[in-house]
Image (cartoon, rainbow, N blue to C red):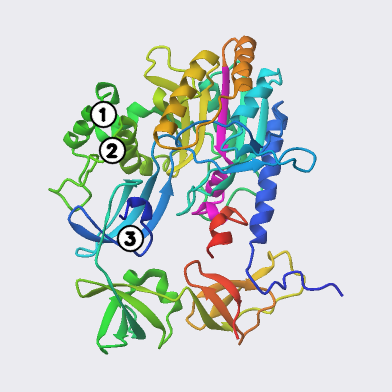
Amino acid sequence: MGGDRSSNSGRVYDRELAQVKSLYFRKIREFFDGRGFLEVEVPCMTPAVDPEPAMHHFETVFDGMYGGKGERIPMYLVTSPEFQMKKLLGSGFGNIYTLARVFRNGEAGGGRHNTEFTMLEWYRMDVGYEEMMDETEKFVKWMAGQSGLENFPGSKNLSRDISWDRKSLNDLFIEYCGINLNENRGVEQLKKAAKEAGIAKLGGLSGENFYDTNACETWDDVMYKIFLNHIEPKLGFEKPVFVYNYPASQAALAKKCERDPFWAERFELYINGNELCNGFSELTDPVEQRKRFEEQNKMRAEQGRTTFPVDEEFLTSLESLRLQCGKGCGGNALGADRLLKVLIGKEKIEDVMLFPIEKMLYK
Amino acid sequence: MTTTTDIRTNMSIVWNGHTWLVLMAQFVNPGKGSAFTRAKLRNLRTGQVVENTFRSGEAVELAEVENKRCQYLYNDGTNYVFMGNDDYEQFSLDKDFLGDATKYLIDGTEVYAMYIDGNPVSIQLPPKMAFKVISTPPGVRGDTASGGSKEATIETGAVVKVPLFIEEGETIRVNTETGAYDGKAN
């Protein structure tokens, strides 16, 4: 007689979750395959990675071919599939998507991040970020309507036919804080504007200024601190919202806005305060891109961190991509685990993973 | 030096002239620029709960806390009464204040109480505790439709998800932080 398959005297793992997640990935593939995208595989580990200073990579060593000849070639776990995806685009692959495992050292704790997670990333030729927002909205609504993914306690009806909001980052600063970022492009200006706007008062403790941007050194830090405290926790509750046009300094791989290059054609989607994706009109200028990489590596060096060799093949692919797509190319990177979390109404990202890092290491 | 990166649940910090108990701490990385820690804080003087997102790496002051061992005695529905092991002094904490901890308190449970300025502000349960299962449906062998687990009510009245082979009267270990089943206890 077969043994009791659940006679593990240790922990309980959530089989129901495994069933939902399996269905979820099947549905993602159904959507993209059905729209003519080709699913591609990309490596988890590469010799050259994105020098984005906000990312901390896992670093490892390749011992060499044929059983390891004692070479010690530095290799890095990817924080995003982007570079490899763009190489495929450069080679003429057309519309592609991937469900890639990505790794961000140190990113875990509190329910929003897990160090290892699944990124759904897709690219469409001859479109810009507006079309990518349209497609993202279609995708999430379609997923939310799939039998087996709807009607969970705590989940919202996202499949209804109402248009989602689209607001620029500056619109949000004006709406929630009374601050116009365009009029406050210097770091001291922005700090002053934050103080004057009186957005500091924490409810109930009036008369005292709880706002502290003094420790922030860069404009980006001040901006994010205001955003994370006063804007993000309110986004996407009544209706999902796309936030578009971010400062070019925070969008190294995106095209700058033609009308005002301070801003870049980047967007994010918020549902119930959760940031779900990060998409662009992709930058396809290898000269501009190289410049941005050099700036990022310089910042890393100043912080005493590893700098990465510039991925020359990546830059060559960008040139090829530029020649292929007239109007441009759109891309989006969506946190697949986070989206599932929102669809089935779970509170923490650990609740949609069988082996979150916290469970493996600390509990 | 303690920084905002070290903020964790159940810590006490001094911030902007007030003392706060950290109810929840969450790591946030927008992917560009600095990382942040978002925390839910309870003002220990007014009881007010606020949320604030701190930039990682900023210096933060830890409040001076004293930890004392005490025992849970009883509750009258709203007030949960404890007694210090050393001084035999009794104090009570509100049910809402204690939150999920009330799910795991049995008469005599030993806990740590955190004191600030001589006032008890929170209690810490042992991370894993043993409880008797007082009610649970019989598990059917090979029942994978239920996901391989069922609900069990423990002696405090709380409900825990357990494997199908756990029966009434058995003693199980529960992780008091997550509420998850953590094996059979002897």
Q: Examine the rendered structure and indicate whether residue B45 appears above or below residue A83.
A: below
Q: In terms of image quadrants, where is residue A83? A: top right
Spot occupied by residue A90 in the image (x, y as percentages of width and height): 66, 18
Q: Secondary structure at mark 2?
A: loop
Quarter of the image that includes the N terminus of chain A: bottom right
Spot occupied by residue A234 in the image (x, y as percentages of width and height): 36, 42
- Mark 3 closeness class: few <14, some 14–19, many ≥20 residues within 10 Å: many
Residue with the mark numbered 1? A187
Q: Secondary structure at mark 3?
A: strand
Q: In terms of image quadrants, where is residue A336? A: top right
Q: Please state the chain letter of the residue tagged with numbered disc 2 in the rendered image.
A: A
Say which residue appears at 26% left-offset and 41% top-offset: A215
Residue with the mark numbered 3? B22
In the rendered structure, which amino acid carries the disc numbered 2? Answer: Cys
In the rendered image, the residue lying farthest to the left is: A207
Spot occupied by residue A330 in the image (x, y as percentages of width and height): 57, 22
Magenta segment: A329-351
Residue with the mark numbered 2? A216
Q: Nearer the viewer, mark 2 or mark 3?
A: 2
